[in-house]
Amino acid sequence: MSVAENLASQVERPPELRRQWTRGRILGHALVGLWILLGIGLVTYLFGAWNPALFERYLPLYWSGLQVTLALVGASMVIGALLSVPIAYARMSSNRLLNSLAYAYVYFFRGTPLLAQTFLVYYGLGSFRAELDAVGLWTFFRDAWYCGVFAFSLNTAAYQAEILRGAIESVPRGQWEGAESLGLHRLQTMWKVILPQAMIVALRPYGNEFILMVKASAIVAIITVYDLMGETRRAYAQTFDFQTYIWAGLIYLSIVEALRHFVDWVERRITVHLKR
Amino acid sequence: MDSVWTLLSFGPKGWSDDIAYGVLVTISLALATLPIGLVIGFFVAVAKQSSEPSLRMAGNVYTTIFRGLPELLTLFVVFYGGQIAVGQIIRFFSPGTVVEINSFVAGMIALGVVFSSYCSEVFLSAFRAIPAGQYEGGYAIGLSKGQTMRLVVLPQLIRIALPGLANLWLNLLKDTALVSAIGLPDTLRQAGIAARVTKEAFLFFGVACLVFLVLAMISSVGIHAIERKVGSSGVTR
């Protein structure tokens, strides 16, 4: 055994500090305890309020409401994504007229409440019933669900256009120049060089937009669409049982959390090559 | 049939006075919610960046819940749930009283918790942008924890967080429209009443949208002024 090793094993260290009960630690434990108590309270409330007749009656309705919500969000997101491409193109173009038109569109839909936009479509377009009838669009705008999809698509198109523009502009100019020097066509450059890099940047904002849409979709309940929120409102109005809202909250919360973790997982997967 | 200008006048046949009242309600609700949200959001952010795991957890649970629930649902839960809860407490003392929660207060609470949970995220990322040396420097010249926070960290924090907070303010302004669903006579509800009475829905909901646009524009001007004042644009770090 060498001298150095011998010495190292005999070194006297100060004793490990015990973790003390600082004010922060006490407060933290108290708050976590409060959350746990609230959780237990919620579970006991739901357990005490357990009512098989209620479930038998409303479970299928909640299920159909959930399907309406997801269909509405899915349809709006897809239509919005399609609409966002020309808007983002116009926003980035050097044509002054095109640029300002797209800017006005985005500013209007981002600057006003989605609820007001939905009202404008659902109630407001009713003012033009004769004109809409003449072009055969009245059957479309008479239906609350279609109006919801219409308003939501226009709204999310504005947000998605900004996401797309930000992501494309985040790709350095050198990428365009490099592709050009290789003789790639502009569309090829966009498709094969720029978009793959832009989509990594855009993934998180797109995920957030999806989550925001799921949450915002609750407002179509106000224009009489029976989505998850609409079914909840109907169930509460018929039974005055508060657990209807609690169940809806739990469902929304689990959808949002699942989506959030899914986006995290996808991001970890597609950025593996960037980690060092 | 009255002309558009009669409908939009301030006179007995016009609706502008009603809508102006609604705008007042919208603005006061947003302004009343802002300080609550900022204060709660700040303390939640402090909890989330602390070294104590239990505090971090408590803060994260708060954000997860109130960012995950739809704003409208939070509003209804506060409005109806609050009514039931307060009612039961009061009936315990004096049976037979009927309780009704003020929709303004319900809106303030619901929007406040939603705003604060987003706000805590903005503050949290601002906290992370402040190097540890700032705290250490504060302690080294003999400032207490509270003084370091107040005199050294907070001024920088606000500067960094300002753009994010400005965004949240614009969102808050738009979210106030939701309180029309629980009967508070805000801009959108007043426009809805006008639309129902006059059968000019497109006109009045269009006016409501324009009101919100104008409020957003005024806010942008105000935010720019504040940013110039605290020199936010000058800081490049």
Image (cartoon, coloured by chain):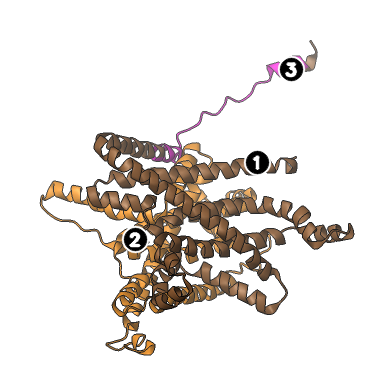
Residue A112 in the image: x percent, y percent?
A: 47, 69
Give the image location of residue B182, x and y in percent: 30, 61
Mark whose residue sits in front, 1 or 3: 1
Could you tell whether B189 is left or right of B155 in the image? left
Q: Which chain is the one coloured orange? A: B
Seen at 23% across and 47% down, the residue is A239
**Which residue lies under the disc numbered 1?**
A268
Viewer-proximal residue, A21 or B92?
B92
Residue that badge 3 annotates: A7
Colour given to chain A in the rendered image = brown
Q: On the image, numbered disc 2 is attached to which residue?
A: B107
As shown in the figure, which amino acid type bears the numbered disc 2? Gly
Exactly how many numbered labels are in the figure?
A: 3
Q: Which of A203 and B138 lies nearest the eye of the viewer?
A: A203
Instruction: Say whether mark 3 and mark 1 are on the same chain.
Output: yes
Q: In this view, does B152 lie above or below A62?
A: below
